[in-house]
């Protein structure tokens, strides 16, 4: 089984690495741009989002998104 790929953009996505330290191992996610900047995607305003296994996952809150990330790596 392949490893779950999670990528977050600390600048735009509403999630920073420090929010994940207690729930995910450092090698479970990476930080950096993944091409969904708020300037070009205004529909993501006010949402927390990340790329999980190549798909954009957006939630209304940071807590909900983190829960989806934890489920994805479990």
Image: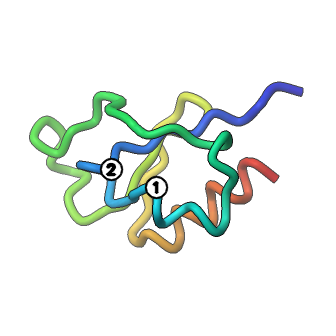
* For residue 60, side relative to residue 1 (left or right): left
Q: Residue at x 24, y 65 (%)?
A: 46
Q: Secondary structure at mark 2?
A: loop
Residue with the mark numbered 1: 17
The residue sitting at the right extreme is: 1
Q: Is residue 17 left or right of residue 72?
A: left
Q: Secondary structure at mark 1?
A: helix
**Residue drawn 53% across and 70% down?**
64
Say if mark 2 contacts mark 1, CB within 8 Å. Answer: yes
Mark closer to the chain start, 2 or 1: 2
Q: Quadrant of residue 28?
A: top right
Whole-angstrom CA distance, mark 2 to mark 1, is 7 Å
The vertical placement of 55 against 64, above or below, is above
Q: Quadrant of residue 71?
A: bottom right
How many residues crowd around disc 2 within 10 Å: few (fewer than 14), some, or many (20 or more)?
A: some
Name the residue beneath numbered marker 2.
10
């Amino acid at each position: 089984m392949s490893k779950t790929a999670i990528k977050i953009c600390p600048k735009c996505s509403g999630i920073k690495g420090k929010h994940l330290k207690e729930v995910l191992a450092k090698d479970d996610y990476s930080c950096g741009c993944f091409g969904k900047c708020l300037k070009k995607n205004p529909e993501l305003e006010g949402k927390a989002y990340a790329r999980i296994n190549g798909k954009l996952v957006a939630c209304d809150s940071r807590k909900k998104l983190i829960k989806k990330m934890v489920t994805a790596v479990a």
